Amino acid sequence: QMHRYARRHAHAPRAASAAIGLPTPAAMRPLFPFLLLWHLAGVGAHEGASHGAPAEAEHGPASAWPPPPTASDMAPSSQATTAPASGAAARPPTSDDLVKFYSEQGFIGAGNDLEVLEDATVDEAVAACTHFPTCTGFTFQVSNDSSSTYKIFLKAHDAQVSQSDAWLSYLKVGVVLPPVANFTVGDLELELRDGSFTAQVLRRKNANFSFVEPLQNTTALPLCQRLGDLNLRVKPSSATGYWATFTSSAGVLIQAETMSVEGEAGDADGVTYTKGDKLYRVLAAHDITALLNATEAQPYPLPLQVVRFWEEVKEAGARDAALVLRFNITNVSGEQVTLGGVGFPMPQAGDTAELITAVWNDPHVGMHHGFVEWVRIVEDEDTLVATSEELTTPLEAWRPVLEDCNCKDFWEWTAVSGAWSEDWANNQQYPFLNISQNLQNTGIWSAGADSPWPAWHNSEVVRTPVTNWNEPSVVTLAPQQTVSFAVRLQLAPDGPRTRDDVLEANDKVVFHAVPGYVLASDMRNATLFAKLPAGVGLDEITTIPANCVSVHHIRAGDLRSSEDRDAYTVFGVSCGVGAEGTCRVSFTLSDGSIATVHYFVTPEVFHKQVQNLGNHWADVSWLPYEYPDPFGRSASVMPWDREDGVHVIDDSRAYDVGLSDDAGAGNNLGFGTKVNFMPTQHQVARVDDYIRFTLLGVKPDIAQEPLRSLQDPETYEVRMTMYYYMNDQYGVHFDYNYTEGDKCTIGYATPNWCMTENMANATYRAFNYPHQVATYYAMYRVAKYHSNLQTIREYGFYLDMAYKTTLKIGRGGPGLMDGTVFREVLIALKLEASLGNDTFAEYAALLEDKMHARATNWAKQPYPYGSEFAFDSTGQEEVVIWLSYFGMYEDANKTVNHILSYMRASATWAYNGGARSLGDLGNNGKWFVTADAGFSPRGLMHYRSGLNMIPLIEWYRTFPDEFLLLEIAMGAMAGQMSNINRRGETSMMFHALPYVLDHDPHSGDYGLGFFGHSLESAAYFVNHPTFGPVCYLCDTAPFPVPTNSTLVTIFPRDSYRARVFVEPLAYYFVAQSGTIANVVVDFKAKSIAVQFDDAAAGYEGGSVREKLFTHFHVQVSKESFLRPGRNLRLVSPREHQVLAPGLYKFLARGANHVATFAYD
């Protein structure tokens, strides 16, 4: 067996011109037993996978493919193109240099056996595991005799050792050698790894961090993917069945073959060549064919030669050079070969354990004009941008590298995705084609499951139709034909705000959308601005599905306002009749490139989306008082599974169904928030029932002993969960059928928490308090501003409870999710104090003091971004809000900049303000789309998006020249509406994995993001320096608004139609009761008229009998003194009250209610 391993991994150098023929059946016979073992192990198995015909779309004719970068033939050479770095090995590293083993007493658990060596020495096991790329270690039982041979189990995946004196285990680790070469390209420093010549480090010059994960012992092993690796899926014309898969990361223990290239005359630095106005210089060139051929369990050797180039490119007039990563792929067989997958791993230094060195990346999956953007999480938010360098290399798909050795959450720039799309159509991705053995061993899921991924309800699995971001393609190579794939890597000059400068410099289309990429059918003025590369025209526009949106030119003469603006092509965008869901718009340009933009069309207009959601919470997912729940959870909104159309009553994650924590409380928080800003009498009564019967009360006629409310009405403490798992230690109080209890022991697939009674009764978790505060605050506003709506208590009671619950959080700790509600409570207390309530005045002083202490504590911290974890993306909302409230703008600005590391602008709707989910699926989702793969699922438009939008949009209102923040915030604000389906059922997040690309069926913790959406939902009229007058979540008359116009009418199209921000004056109008039909701004007369919508705002269902309030309340604030306009006052109606500075009250009588303001 050892000889078999050695033979398989002994790769002799292959001449560039040598043809690679397919092995004969006889030659393949020795591999069959190995393939069978691989299949039975459930790792990399591909026999019998169902798939459709290969995609027919290709990147273009062979004549369009760029030639290799050198005219001369390349031959193997013993001399490197660059001198070794200081300290580098003088000889090529061997496997002994690159891999080491260390022993631990104990055993590696059952499963994931790659091979069993029946009678082998430790040295033989070391040799086998060394040359087996997927082997991570081995384990064997120590015998009592003097034997030196053992039955040894070779293990794959994460090898965890459990203590046992009778067993011994050896774990494989990589060895990090000094880099073999260093290059400086522009402001980038690249260090190449000894042996494979992949990127060991890529950083800004002289920086203390790397954009890609620096090489470490745990990532220096085979199959640990680096920038510079290549992943291929290949099928020769004579082959049948599944695609062969090759990765250069398998060949870490093999020396890449250095290629010598002749430079132009007099060029001592190696080869240079030109293409148009671009000058390329080859820094390093290596044949990596042998590295790719190290991939195991493939039915034939790679029928290709692959040469990788690291290059420098500089364009005429460019300030700096850029780095280019190129692969030349040549078909060296005697038959056609189809490439079904070509991908460049794009790892990020995303380990947040070291926050100062952490970097995250995200894409716009926009074909030839797509990009990947790395942003450093803290400090200066350094930004690196990857763009396509050749027509062959579109960002066709953004693929998770599930096959990476450690599943480090790395993704891949996939330029060719036809083979992968066959997997994705079945909700799978190689090598995970079947449900794992571990999951089968639970007895819950069977080997014949329709998907590799479990769903957290009974024994269901993930099955959903998949629509790719872009049309998948394949590339077919004739014998001896070469195709070149390349991407460019370049620093943005000044962080995320200058990313578009890089795109423009690299001849990529720069897109800006108003209001964004999530649209509703009533948005008549939606606009797309596209800055095309110089000298490139537009040939065609297509949409998939057909007519999902209509894209049409707007006359340029109406839109010119500056020299910059002339460079943009401007399109009007309108939703197609009956359109719903994701919509791809493809722009085919005259240079043969394609730029795609990805929209999402909501099922209903935003206002109706919220109405449907409220009706769902009130009447569908509402658990009636009479429901016989022994835990006392009735009279509440329970989590909902929109796939099965059922309440989620039981879960192994007790907090999910216990009305507390983020997932459990999210639905009632969301419902209370909806009632806050769009109340109906029926729904107000529901929230009151929740408060009196469940939050503060008990139901002795329904629930069973011990009777406990969610919140203690005397101490104001909030329990961890009302639902728990009873046991003998704490008492079995009643019989209960825990239908999901069989999942309690599956710790590797999700952070289950089948909480015991004592855990459930704990009250220490501060994160549980703001959700309930928001419910009290909602009822305070309903009772105060909607006098004709009946509430059980007067408004002072609800505000009192909001205050006393807020006090329980203490004076320290991190920012809390939806903690902005504490500020709203403080503002309400100060308002009541100004109206003569001395008790609330005392409350306000105490609360402000507490919040000042918290803000001061955050200002002292370099990175106040923790939660229950050392780092999280949930507390930044409250950090910015309170630092800004107390005027600590410099400290707040650091956090705003930090938020831009995970809130991005992208013309792919789900990434546009989509934030970054961290562990949230495991906490409260249904579809476990990476279970047992060791890969973190990627969620978008989770509540993190809705909450991180709050500081961005509020910062924009204060500093209204920060237009990037406005774009991102609008993406997040509108994106929260994409989670709601036509029935009003919501989802906790959108799955970004390409084999899902759908919303999770569980409602989960969506309510937190909906709180942020509802608090900030508004229309924004903006005079943009480039695009001129535009309206975000609103329409205007006239449209387009001429730049020199002095009169404009604004029609809100946001969810509540109760807030309008007039950016040229920085005035923010908020209807505390009622909704706004339109706002007329007369800049010449210096007047602003707010027209209220009598039918929609003042009356429930438009009936006078159901009038919700007797008076309109309008709040107006001057958000920024960077804009003109002073001394705003209400001039009509004359009969009005000024309750507080900027807060006006006037009678709702008759019709045609208009509030007219004047300013200086």
Image (cartoon, rainbow, N blue to C red):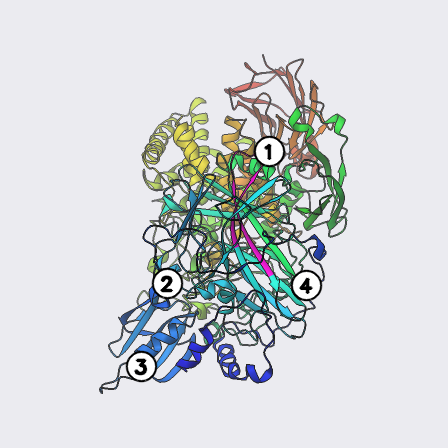
Q: Are marks 2 and 3 in contact (CB under 8 Å)?
A: no
| Relative side of 1097 to 901, left or right | right
Give coordinates of residue 649: x percent, y percent: 51, 61
Query: Mark 3 or mark 2, which is nearer the start of the sequence?
Result: 2
Query: Mark 1 or mark 2, which is nearer the start of the sequence?
Result: 2
Secondary structure found at label 2: loop
Residue that label 4 marks: 476
Instruction: Using the image, determine if residue 423 lies above or below residue 640.
Output: below
Residue that label 3 marks: 121
Residue that label 1 marks: 1018
The quadrant of the image that shows the N terminus is bottom left
Secondary structure found at label 3: loop
Give coordinates of residue 583: x percent, y percent: 69, 49
Q: Are marks 3 and 4 in contact (CB under 8 Å)?
A: no
Q: Nearer the viewer, mark 1 or mark 4?
A: 4
Which residue lies at the image location 59% right of the left edge and 18% below the top edge? 1136
Q: Nearer the viewer, mark 2 or mark 3?
A: 2
Amino acid type at image mark 2: Pro
Q: How many marks?
A: 4
Query: Mark 1 or mark 3, which is nearer the start of the sequence?
Result: 3
Q: Please tell me the numbered disc located at residue 93.
A: 2
Q: Nearer the viewer, mark 3 or mark 1?
A: 3
Query: Where is residue 748, by image quadrant?
Result: bottom left
Whole-number angstrom distance, CA of label 2 to CA of label 3? 25 Å
Query: Mark 4 or mark 2, which is nearer the start of the sequence?
Result: 2
Whole-number angstrom distance, CA of label 3 to CA of label 1? 71 Å
